[in-house]
Amino acid sequence: MAFFSENGEQAFRGKQVYEWLWKKGVHQFEDMTNLSKETRQFLEESFSINHIEVDTMQRSKDGTLKNAVRLHDGLIVESVLIPTPKRTTACVSSQVGCSLDCKFCATSRLKRMRNLNPDEIYDQVVAIDKQSRLYYNKKLTNIVFMGMGEPLMNYNNVLKAIDKITSDEGLGMSPKRIVVSTSGIPKMIRKMAEDEVKFNLAVSLHSAIDEVRTQIMPFNETFPLKDLREALQFWYTKTKRRITYEYVVWEGINDTTKDILALIDFCKFAPSKVNLIEYNPIDDGIFQQAKTSAIEKYVSMLEAKNITVTVRRSRGKDIDAACGQLANKA
């Protein structure tokens, strides 16, 4: 607003521009139709809008949409729209590449080039909301930070984006409909609790045995399960919100009774639920989907201990849009 006042314009023009950029998702000054032609030209000469562009879009046979999103500097990230009869969910990225080294994830094979800025994260959501309305005739209902990157390694920008997404000046979405999924950075989980965030937390766990988890997620050696558990206990103490564990079962890696008992023990310290996720191959023979009998054993043993468990079938596998498959192959 100060910019307009200093240049002989009425200050309320600043609010109009803000609404065009954030609430309406406009990427060109010329589209800001309640501004005079002269004002729009002046803005064009004074500023640039570093917006994202959906470079390519793929559509799965199950209705899932995958976007290759081009950033202002030419780098590419991917985002996904997952439709169901009752909701549409945006899976958004937080980094170009990833900071971590999970062996089963295609994104981890890309070096981390940079963090996404808050506006780049926000714009992914705006683009998917538009697609949801266009292709499924409903507004976006949910957001998961499960795309490319580790959200807690880009903490400040992710929180700024969520603030904008949930604000009345932005999309006005309830934080209860947002899930931030982390591979488990204890210090940052504690910080989230201290910052009294209102969104939900999911942890990509995959094993509650240190030796096994380090085998598949080598950074676990730096952030062992003991530290993760203490951070999650702190989270629950501060927020009183249950924790979701994302968990893939692989044949010959974490499909034994010992693995299940360790997970049950890990779930005891705070209310939680377990999502058993179908594995999505990334052309690596080391990791293979566990047998159905192993999944069923997980379910029966968890339920016997009154732990909520859901088996999640992956969406968008035919276009490499499922969990763990995002790697800019489009």
Image (cartoon, helix red, strand yellow):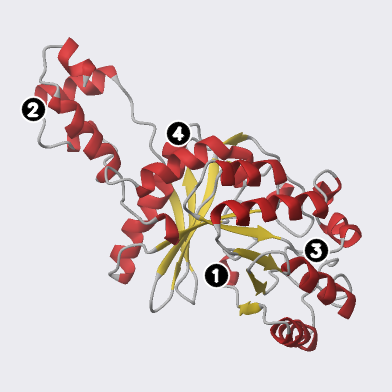
Question: In this figure, which residue is indicated by the disc labeled 3?
Answer: 284
Looking at the image, is mark 2 or mark 1 earlier in the sequence? Answer: 2
Secondary structure of the residue carrying tag 1 is loop
Task: State how far apart marks 1 and 3 are (Cα).
Answer: 19 Å
Horizontal side, residue 80 vs residue 3: left or right: right
66 over 118 or under it: above or below: below
Secondary structure of the residue carrying tag 2 is loop
Task: State how far apart marks 2 and 4 are (Cα).
Answer: 27 Å
Q: Quadrant of residue 85?
A: bottom left
Question: In this figure, which residue is indicated by the disc labeled 1?
Answer: 316
Viewport quadrant of the C terminus: bottom right
Looking at the image, is mark 1 or mark 3 earlier in the sequence? Answer: 3
> Is mark 1 in CB contact (under 8 Å) with mark 3?
no
Viewport quadrant of the N terminus: top left
Viewer-proximal residue among 168 and 82: 168
Q: Can residue 53 be seen in the rendering of this structure?
A: no
Q: Which mark is residue 36?
A: 2
Horizontal side, residue 196 vs residue 110: left or right: left
Looking at the image, is mark 3 or mark 2 earlier in the sequence? Answer: 2
Question: In this figure, which residue is indicated by the disc labeled 4?
Answer: 72
Amino acid tagged 1:
Gly
Q: Residue at x 77, y 48 (%)?
A: 101
